[in-house]
Image (cartoon, helix red, strand yellow):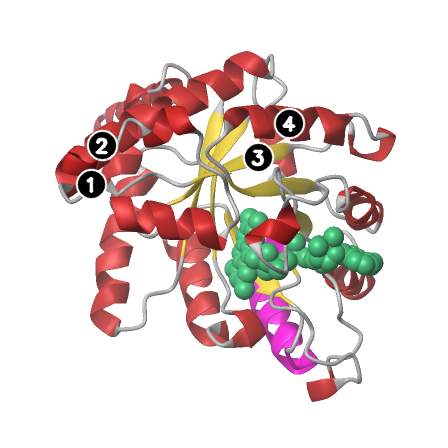
């Protein structure tokens, strides 16, 4: 991933897409069809989520392997380390390497139940322990991403979160110095919070040149939007809330349409305000397709990615008909 980012030109933005493994066979089939279509938009990479504690380990690795091997997409496998047997982590890393997956998003997952080596996973208390483990076992083979939190990380309540957004910073530095290569952020709706966070991160010598990829959630329904913001402790600015008056909150189509415009505005502002420092946007797709396609086509910046991909595809077609 970092090699691909580094190879982009000065003015060449990118986006990436997160998917989760569906529970059923038919859900999986639908997702494969969607992935095929969404890959035509030109994402730089895709990521596949991992159920905390390894609960989706098989489905996650299967989906990631399909993305990498069958769909030819640069794929990043999420991996959490707490409350998980080391053997599960070893299996996932081995399968990833055998399938040509070169990127891991190293996460903590739920807080460790007890540091007294439950399930033989006692060495893993924080994400940094997983970063160290991957580097120890696999050297430089994997490009490793870690999570960042523009509004601070909270294990506790929303009220606790307000305490101090600088608390995580030394631990973020620790993850990078342990060998992580890039940062994907928690979702947010308040661009100013991200801008402040980006500046704070850049002020640390060890983090100055590390790619930060802001994570955004398309607004596909009013209730999901509210729930996701609560779960991830992301505040919603009044200016955004005001765009969803009571009378449209139950009208999913209207919410989605406004949601697309909100996201486009956020994306364009991120690019403008960070002066080309931020190269790409990560979308928490929730496996949904339509709003992503609309957002990337409408954004002044991301539409360049789609246009480039269309050109590549038409050149390929011309070559094959020669
Ligand atoms: P860490 O970096 O370990 O930080 C956790 C907390 O511990 C922070 O509050 C930090 O300040 C503190 N801390 C860190 N190191 C130390 C230390 N040495 N001493 C004291 N305190 C310390 N969860 C899933 O289950 N599956 C997924 O697929 C998944 N994907 C995600 C993708 C992204 C982009 C993000 C942002 C989150 C994702 N999560 C996922 C959620 C994540 O697992 C949780 O947010 C988790 O609570 C923290 O993970 P972390 O990797 O940020 O932990």
Is label 1 within 8 A of ligand 1 (CB to nearest ligand atom)? no
Q: Is residue 77 visible?
A: no
Residue, disc 1:
249
* Magenta span of residues: 84-106
Residue, disc 2:
245
Q: Are marks 2 and 1 in contact (CB under 8 Å)?
A: yes
Label 4: state its secondary structure. helix
Residue, disc 3:
213
Residue 288 image offset from top left, x and y in percent:
28, 48
Q: Is 89 colored magenta in this rendering?
A: yes
Q: Quadrant of residue 313?
A: top left
Q: CA distance from mark 2 to mark 3?
A: 31 Å
Q: State the mark number for residue 164.
A: none
Q: CA distance from mark 3 to mark 4?
A: 13 Å
Is label 3 within 8 A of ligand 1 (CB to nearest ligand atom)? no
The nearer-to-camera label among 2 and 4 is 2
Residue 291 image offset from top left, x and y in percent:
26, 36
Please name whichever residue, 30 or 232, is drawn nearer the observer in this view of the structure: 232
Label 1: state its secondary structure. loop
Q: Quadrant of the N terminus?
A: top right
The nearer-to-camera label among 4 and 1 is 1
Q: Quadrant of the C terminus?
A: top left
Residue, disc 4:
6
């Amino acid at each position: 991933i970092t090699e691909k980012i580094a190879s982009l030109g000065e003015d060449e933005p990118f986006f990436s897409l997160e998917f989760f493994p569906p529970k059923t066979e038919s859900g999986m089939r639908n997702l494969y069809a969607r992935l095929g279509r969404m890959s035509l938009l030109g994402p730089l990479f895709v990521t596949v989520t991992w159920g905390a504690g390894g609960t989706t380990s098989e489905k996650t690795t299967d989906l990631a392997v399909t993305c990498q091997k069958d769909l030819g997409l640069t794929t990043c496998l999420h991996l959490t380390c707490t409350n998980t047997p080391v053997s599960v982590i070893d299996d996932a890393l081995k399968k990833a390497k055998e399938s040509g997956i070169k990127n891991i998003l190293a996460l903590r997952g739920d807080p460790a139940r007890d540091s007294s080596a439950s399930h033989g996973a006692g060495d893993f208390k924080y994400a940094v322990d997983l970063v160290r483990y991957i580097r120890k076992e696999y050297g430089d083979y994997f490009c490793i991403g870690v999570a960042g939190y523009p509004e601070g990380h909270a294990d506790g309540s929303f009220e606790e979160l307000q305490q101090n957004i600088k608390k995580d910073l030394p631990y973020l530095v620790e993850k990078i110095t342990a060998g992580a290569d890039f940062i994907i952020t928690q979702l947010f709706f308040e661009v100013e919070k991200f801008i402040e966070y980006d500046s704070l991160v850049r002020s640390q010598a060890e983090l100055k040149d590390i790619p930060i990829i802001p994570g955004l959630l398309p607004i596909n329904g009013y209730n999901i939007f509210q729930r996701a913001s609560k779960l991830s402790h992301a505040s919603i600015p009044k200016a955004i809330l005001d765009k969803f008056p009571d009378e449209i909150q139950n009208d999913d189509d209207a919410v989605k349409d406004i949601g697309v415009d909100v996201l486009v505005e956020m994306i364009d502002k991120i690019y403008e305000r960070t002066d080309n420092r931020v190269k790409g946007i990560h979308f928490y797709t929730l496996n949904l397709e339509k709003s992503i396609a609309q957002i990337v086509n409408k954004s002044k910046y991301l539409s360049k990615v789609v246009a480039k991909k269309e050109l590549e595809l038409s050149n390929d077609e011309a070559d094959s008909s020669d």
